Amino acid sequence: MPFSMSQASLPSFETSLNALSAILDKAAAYAAAKKIDPSVLLHTRLSPNMFDLARQVQVAADNAKNGSARLAGVEPPRYEDDETTIDHLKARLAKTIAYLQTLDRKAIDSSAEREITFPLGPRTGQMKGADYLIHFLLPNFHFHVTAAYAILRHCGVEIAKGDYFGAIPIKMT
Amino acid sequence: MPFSMSQASLPSFETSLNALSAILDKAAAYAAAKKIDPSVLLHTRLSPNMFDLARQVQVAADNAKNGSARLAGVEPPRYEDDETTIDHLKARLAKTIAYLQTLDRKAIDSSAEREITFPLGPRTGQMKGADYLIHFLLPNFHFHVTAAYAILRHCGVEIAKGDYFGAIPIKMT
């Protein structure tokens, strides 16, 4: 059974974060073409009490970084949430992908039964590694990438499902 | 390494589909309280060329059903897309969950290296089972559940992240 915890996490995070970076390029091009201040896009929300685009991108990146680090049993670096431009956010995504590439896959692979503890607002959550990956980390990560994508679709940026998936290993006939 | 393809798919689908069913209950209660025709919610979209709520729910359910069946190597049943009420959609979710429970977990577990072919509009996609699960099925499934959730948040339904996650195996302290 060639299937592992690292295989179920790192490649998907990397592909989706790269996809999100390319989506931000399309957002920047759209803003330039329509003469929209890009910060209007970065501050758009789908509902007044949901995160805006900039925060959705930060949280997606932090899900990948912090979640993978917890599975690997190491302390993740903390990034300041000080991005104010699309280029800043793209740099945050690139830095996150570079960090994911430093993680020990074997440590992640051995985490399925290990108890993972993580902050949830003022409280602490605890789950077995496999449950954490499948029931929390992946649904949460894909949630924030989808929310970022949906905000930009809502704003009129011409992106489609292929932009969301990114460069996945698929053969089309 | 107690981690498997079936573990990475079925329990997450079941939990999220149940979560989506409970979210639809809150949508129905909101419509009743605000005297909104529920079909207005079912036909709401985040962008004119994205799916409406009803279709997001159908597609999320079909992702779980068809994707899991393909990994198990069996032909999934085809459900008509004829739901016109929240109750109909909840029945579709329940039927889908019941179907997932009939699938052979061992067949799914042995699918990581098997080539999976699947329709993508007028074309056909082909991926190894593990890649299909991680790079296509899970991102796509969570996309449509998130979109359904986001449409309802956008409409003012009072739901929060816990409603999106559903009954996940977490210990909070």
Image (cartoon, coloured by chain):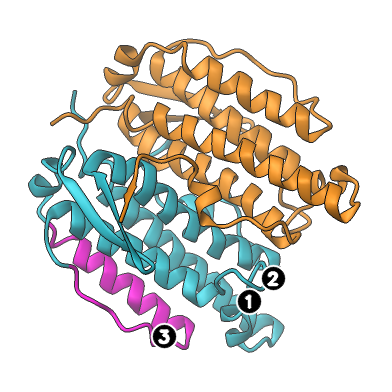
Chain colours: A orange, B cyan
Which residue corresponds to the image point at 51% horizontal and 66% vertical from the top-left? B23
Marks 2 and 1 close (CB-CB < 8 Å): yes
Q: Amino acid at mark 1?
A: Thr
Q: Quarter of the image containing the N terminus of chain A?
A: top left
User: Element type at marker 1?
Assistant: loop
Which residue is located at x 35 percent, y 39 percent? A169
On-image quarter of the C terminus of chain A: bottom left
Q: Which residues are magenta?
A: B76-103
**Which comes before the other along the chain, label 2 or label 3?**
3
Residue B56, magenta (yes or no): no
Of labels 2 and 3, the one closer to you: 3
A114, B112: nearer the viewer: B112
In the current view of this chain or complex, which residue is farthest to the front?
Answer: A173
The answer to which quarter of the image holds residue B26 is bottom right
Q: Which mark is residue B83?
A: 3
Q: Name the residue type under label 2.
A: Cys
Q: Chain of mark 1?
A: B
Q: Gap in Å between the C-alphas at discs 2 and 1?
A: 8 Å
- In the shown orientation, is residue B97 left or right of residue B29? left
Q: Residue at x 40, y 21 (%)?
A: A71
Q: What whole-number distance in Å separates the C-alpha atoms at marks 3 and 1?
A: 15 Å
Name the residue rendered at 19%, 60% in the picture: B69
The residue singled out by tag 2 in the image is B155
- Give the answer, above or below, for where A173 lies relative to B131: below
Residue B124 x, y percent position in the rendering: 30, 60
Q: Position of residue B31 (x, y in %)?
A: 63, 81
Residue A41 image offset from top left, x and y in percent: 81, 49
